Amino acid sequence: MKKCLIFDADDTLWENNIYFERAIEEFLELILPIAPKRECVLGVLNEVEKESIPLWGYGSRNFINSLVETFRRLYGEHDGAGYLSAIEQIGERLLNHPMDIIPGVSSTLESLRERYRLMLFTKGDVEEQSSKVDRSGLKGHFDCIEITEEKTTDAYHELVQRHILDRDFTFMVGNSPRSDVLPALRAGLWAVFVPHPHTWDLEHEEVEPHPRLLVAQSLRDLPSLLAELFPPQD
């Protein structure tokens, strides 16, 4: 059976969270006159996101709704039309940010296609994630693309069963401990952790040594890591 590499998308193949961080900075600057304490605002936003994600899921539009709700909780007046309009403009910039492919991704995927089955497994809003895949120019590298609401251990079990994957020769490659590394390991897969300096705070979890865990400082390291583990037979 051909070995399979399952790739995360956001902040593994292309930049994503930097644009959310920029949106947050714009928001903090916008509401500085009414909420000057940065840590307080970020704390409220964090709580709002924890409440809203289980109800409405991920995606830029839901994030902007979280900014609106954060503003409402901090703003005690009735008339906030100017602020709300400015938040909507922040949202438009976020929704239309460019696709910034991480250096080396395209050439690495191209080289891996010869020896491995490649899949893309991403979470979030289906329409938004599908648009990113289309705009990235990377779609042709993958045999299969799946978008899910959440990457849980059960989601990985279902993915394995649906595509008849061999857990001993299937690797999940991604930057998120919470969504890519830990649930894949719990599902019996291999995991390749590719740390990203701007990984979203809510995706952080402690990653401890594991017999099926590999760490790559960049995606460019992946072919050599895999070759060490499974030396070419030809």
Image (tube, rainbow, N blue to C red):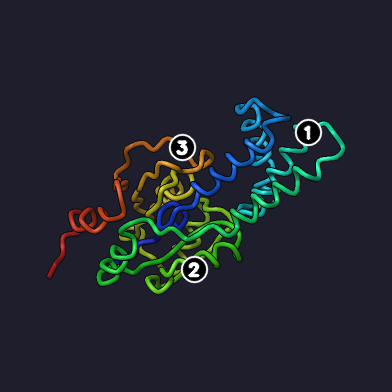
Residue 104, by quadrant, is: bottom left
Q: Measuring 61% from the left and 52% from the top, which residue is drawn there? A: 58
Residue 172, by quadrant, is: bottom left
Q: Are marks 2 and 1 in contact (CB under 8 Å)?
A: no
**Which quarter of the image is occupied by the N terminus?**
bottom left
- The residue labelled by disc 1 is 75
**Mark 3 secondary-structure assignment:** loop
- The residue labelled by disc 3 is 205
Q: Measuring 54% from the left and 57% from the top, which residue is drawn there? A: 97
Task: Name the mark on residue 223.
Answer: none
**Mark 1 secondary-structure assignment:** loop
Q: Nearer the viewer, residue 19 or 107?
A: 19
Q: Nearer the viewer, residue 143 or 19?
A: 19
Left or right: 160 with respect to 37?
left
Where residue 74 appears, x then y in whole percent?
75, 32
Mark closer to the observer (3, 2): 2
Number of other residues with Cα within 10 Å of mark 1, as a class: few under 14, some 14 to 19, many 20 or more: some
Left or right: 75 with respect to 93?
right
Where residue 17 appears, x then y in whole percent?
50, 48
Residue furthest right as drawn: 78
Q: If you read the primary sequence from the N terminus, does the residue marked by circle 2 or circle 1 appear first?
A: 1
Question: Compared with residue 46, is residue 141 higher up or lower down, i.e. above or below?
Answer: below
Where residue 30 appears, x then y in whole percent?
67, 38
- The residue labelled by disc 2 is 135
Number of other residues with Cα within 10 Å of mark 2, as a class: few under 14, some 14 to 19, many 20 or more: few
